[in-house]
Amino acid sequence: MTRPTLAQQLARQGISRRAFLKFCAATASMMALPPTMAPAIAEALGKRTRPSIIWLSFQECTGCTESLTRSHSPTVENLIFDLISLDYHHTLQAAAGEAAELAREQAMEEGGYLVLVDGSIPVADGGVYSTIAGMTNLDMLAHTVKDAAAVVAIGTCAAFGGIPKADPNPTGAKSVAALMADGSIASKPLINVSGCPPIPVVITGVLAHYLTFGTVPELDDLGRPRAYFGDSIHDRCYRRPFYDAGKFAKTFDDEGARKGWCLYELGCKGPTTHNACATAKWNMGTSFPIESGHGCIGCSEPDFWDAGSFYKPLSAATGDLSGLAGGAIAAGAVAGAAAGLYARSQKHKAAASREKMTVDDLKD
Amino acid sequence: MEFLNWVRGPGLEYATVIFLVGILMRFLEMWLIGRKPDLSRPRASASRAGWRAVWRRSLPSEGLMKNSPLVMIAGYVFHIGFLLVLLFYVPHIHFFKDVLGFGWSGLPTPVINFLSILTIAALVALLIHRLIDPVRRFLSTSQDYIVWAVTTLPVVTGYMAMHMDVMPYTTMLALHILSVEILMVVFPFTKLMHAFTFAVSRYYNGAAMGRKGVQL
Amino acid sequence: MSPSLERGINAFVNQIDGPIASYFNSCVHCGMCAHACLFYTETGDPKYTPIYKTEPLRRAWKQNFTFWGRLLSKLGLDKKITDEELAEWETLIYDGCTLCGRCTAVCPVGNDITYMIRKSREAMAASGHAPEGLKMATTRAIEIGSPMGVTIDTLKAQIKHTEKETGLTVPLDVQGAEYLMLLSSAEIAQFNEIIGAVTEIFDRAGVSWTLSSTAFEATNSGIQIGSADLAAELVQRIVDSAERLGVRTVISPECGHAYTALRWEGPNLIGRSYSFEVKHILEVLDELRADGRLQTSGRESARVTFHDPCQLVRRGGVVQQPRSLLNMVADDFVEMPDAGVMNWCCGGGGGVSANERANPLRAQVFSRKKRQLDGLQVEKLVTACSNCRNMLEEGLEENHMEDIEVVGLTELLAEYLPEKK
């Protein structure tokens, strides 16, 4: 069976070429490609047949899927998604039980498919904390990834472990990258699209890039596409001028907050967080968290859940220093007293063994 | 990011514990040796002269200005600049407020910026002087250079972190905090202790002189 | 038991106290003390930097009183103090330091470096690393009663001479006198006019005073060599005599270290406070002046300046008195640069003058005093310490400046006493 091309599918769905080109232009811009690339992208995308995609969900909250599917209907992003051959997805597929697993097996037969993962993978105690159809998440992932062309870790859980991996990590949750690194699963080209959840346009943009060029986009040191994760939220934040001017909101309801001053002192993690929120924004470009008056919580960074309070400034310690100080002072006092008393005993010893000097000591 | 989380969390905890335990230990170890009471009849109050000396020796003296103007000026600039940046940069105040439970108002960022540059310049001048002045070169041991480095690094990394375009802020902030941790760990076991013991030394000296009626 | 390295190290440990530990903790090697030290400024040799002279003491502190130091030396990572090292430091500690106290005065962290060097000498003496000259002077002080070998017979001869000259009685061993006057060997042997001067001044002022045949020597070589035991023995002689005579005040003569030895170190050396007061002759004279009992007539027309003995100003606290006294008689009194608490040492204090080995170095560093005097164009250089006086006379002679006359302040005042009614 020959699959219809993307362009044919789009036309059948009533999406105009003009709307499709607009999407391609937006994608090109997000990927920091020159606008002249848009028609090329459109052409490349238009010629592609529906690639097979297997979406695996492990320890996750479905937020990533929600992020994608609950965007305003009907968006091009959405449709693009509909137009790929999403052969397996717990939440979205109609099939259930053995039929569902069969769909996955079938999709895998052709090879060259793309695996999308959301959620972290528990490995503690033999992986018993999350199983699907009697298979541990790890086994399912290992099995599915084996013949995949590439893997996209969707969301911070799949990319970095996310909330399941947060201290004390009872399930032994790991990210896809960690499993590739320790050899538990086959190493395949991996793209981390972090965020809790990731921005929908970033997910589709990455897919568009892969479909257009057939390659993995340029990645940063955390395996995230530079096009979307190259700048920090702080770098692109519209409140940045207030930071530079030293104007900070002190509480969430003070004058500074009303005037839209910088939220650094209220715990904004913008300076250490890399994501496209400040430019791509959310809810069809309506706004992003800082715009609604709340600091960035750093959700697209590893271990963001363990990086201290969301409401303490970045310069604050994440540990309990004042709690430790008491114990440290007590320990220091004990050690000091011991050292001091030892010094005194040295002095006493020296005094006791001291010989009185007489004038005879001066004669040779 | 994991690096930043480590330095902001466990790293800072280790450093704080070593810093506090070390300082207290070194302080008591010194203090408890004690001194014999002075049996000579005092001419004036020893303790008053002692406290006076703690303050007085912070002021510049004419003789020093004449003999070693560079050490004198750069010394003041570096000490004052370092303290102002440490205590009055807003993010630093937030750190202290979080630990101590109270804060204070800070200096505008451009002022801190300027002070940082001055402090770094003074530190560099002091290092060069240490390398070329015959007396200071002669006296200096490896510890003097180590102490210089661990004092200078936090100022430099802090300045670089403040100017976020130089290097990724996450990396710079982590390096800055790490450099502070190194300073804290090294502190109790080197002559950095003078930051606390200077007051004790001045008191002892001032009291010994003061009871003889000598005000210096 | 003879002196040994073990005894020396033991002495270091005995000398180290809280202040010394604090001083070593505080030193940042800023080098400022070098510029305050005569021996560095005049030679330009960094080894004379005051804090460097305390290096053996620092090592002893580190190895015995600090956690890391103990650990390192236990592991053999810190080299032990050796005899060779102490021998090397001997010239720095004895020849290259007059205990003048200028370093103590300038240290920005407040280190009393002079105290540290004074304490180092205890260990140097205990380990046998004291200069020959000082050993001999101390031996004579203990055995004969004076570092210069002056005996009571010499003093008695001087008394007889003075009585003949002044027609006054010089009181000796007078029970119940108010003041016990001490003298220094140099005064008895060289500058004996001082006895007449004191006799005349006290006579006019109606002061009840005496000399003692059992304690006439004020100087204390034990302090200079750094032997608390021997220094205590010398102090004890004075204390015993003063208490036997029942005096209220003991007067330290025109000598710097004799004053600090008796006034400030003495009670700590013998382990108890005195039943009498100790005053420097200038303090007593200034009190008499304030009470109107010391009167002068006539004025000195020569241009004069005053050399503050280190142990009197910086280490003793006698600063204003000489100026008040000098102004009674001098018409043209000029201060030299750095006069008062920051005056420069004559170069022979702290036992350096008794240490022949140090003579060339001492002559070299006199250049500082010469510079202080250059441009003042004084005819008289007044001081209040017979050791300074000796050093100044020698130095001026060597520098062909003999036209400047060196005088003791007490003597100068005695010259202007009103005629006896």
Image (cartoon, coloured by chain):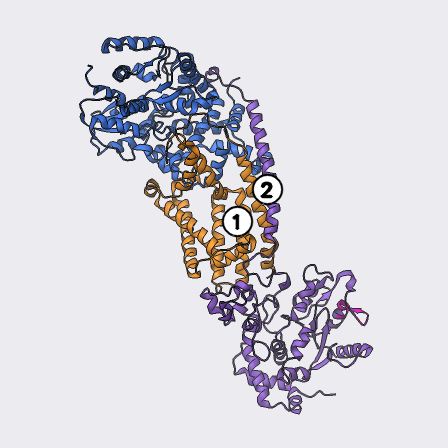
Chain colours: A purple, B orange, C blue
Disc 1 residue type (three-letter): Leu
**Residue C115 image point, x, y percent:** 43, 30
Label 1 Cα neighbours within 10 Å, binned few <14 / some 14-19 / many ≥20: many
Disc 2 residue type (three-letter): Gly
As measured in the structure, the alpha-carbon distance from the residue carrying label 1 to the one carrying label 2 is: 18 Å
Pinpoint the chain carrying mark 2. A
Disc 1 versus disc 2: nearer the observer:
2
- Range shown magenta: A132-140
Q: Can residue C357 be seen?
A: no
Pinpoint the chain carrying mark 1. B
The reply, left or right, for residue C25 in relation to residue C45 is right
How many numbered marks have been drawn onto this rendered protein structure?
2
Magenta run includes residue B155: no
> On the image, numbered disc 1 is attached to which residue?
B183
In the rendered image, which quarter contains the C terminus of chain C?
top left
| Element type at mark 1 | helix
Q: Is residue C110 above or below residue B179?
A: above
Magenta run includes residue A135: yes
Q: Is residue A160 above or below residue C386?
A: below
Q: Is residue A41 above or below residue A134?
A: below
Label 2 Cα neighbours within 10 Å, binned few <14 / some 14-19 / many ≥20: many
Residue A192: image quadrant is: bottom right
| Element type at mark 2 | helix
Residue A346: image quadrant is: top right
> On the image, numbered disc 2 is attached to which residue?
A332
**Residue C396 image point, x, y percent:** 25, 26
Farthest residue to the front: give it. C291
Query: Residue C229: which numbered mark, if any?
Result: none
Please report contact status of discs 1 and 2: CB closer than 8 Å, yes or no: no
Task: Say which residue appears at 49% left-offset and 53% top-offset.
Answer: B153
